[in-house]
Image: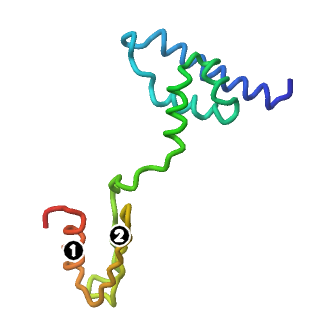
Amino acid sequence: MDTTTSERSGRIDGVRQRLERWRRTRPYPRAPIPDTIWAAAVGLVGQHGLYRTARRLRLDYATLKQHVEAADRPQRAGTPAGFVELAAPHPSMGDGCVIELQGPRATVRLQLTRLALADLAHLSRLLAGADA
């Protein structure tokens, strides 16, 4: 057995041990498997295959497949950004700016010229849906 095979086997054994430890100490019999363990199992699928990973970890094949497919999907575009900073070089009126809003069906581009920062801040709040 070469080192890469033993390393891969060691990784799956490590995840199997984590899963078995969780199964022994879970708060109640039908408690959901933690996301960290699912993520580790999904990471093993690329190396060992879906069937072999599910079998070695004693996981339901269809459920593991759902987690793999969910990990492959791009994150939804409708997820709001946590924080967006609008930085201006000078506190006075600028030469202009361009604001692009990307939605699931279209991209809207606003080109604004000679707009005061207070007006830009007000416009940003309106676009974000926050109270002005």
At x 73%, y 28%, the residue is: 8
Which element type, helix, strand or loop, lies under badge 1?
Answer: helix
The residue carrying pointer 1 sits among few (fewer than 14), some (14 to 19) or many (20 or more) residues within 10 Å by Cα, namely: few
**Percent coordinates x, y for residue 115 in the rendering:** 25, 86
**Percent coordinates x, y for residue 101 in the rendering:** 35, 69
Amino acid type at mark 2: Leu
Give the answer, above or below, for where 57 lies relative to 7.
above
Give the answer, above or below, for where 49 lies relative to 27.
below
The residue carrying pointer 2 sits among few (fewer than 14), some (14 to 19) or many (20 or more) residues within 10 Å by Cα, namely: few
The residue identified by callout 2 is 101
Colouring used for the render: rainbow
Amino acid type at mark 1: Leu
How many marks overall? 2
Q: Residue furthest left?
A: 132
Which element type, helix, strand or loop, lies under badge 2?
Answer: strand
Q: Which mark is residue 80?
A: none
Give the answer, above or below, for where 26 lies relative to 4.
above
Quarter of the image with the N terminus in it = top right
Q: Can you tell which quarter of the image residue 99 is in?
A: bottom left
In this rendering, the label closer to the viewer, 2 or 1: 2
**Percent coordinates x, y for residue 21 in the rendering:** 52, 13
Q: Which mark is residue 123?
A: 1
At x 73%, y 24%, the residue is: 9
Query: Who comes first in sequence, dot 2 or dot 1?
Result: 2
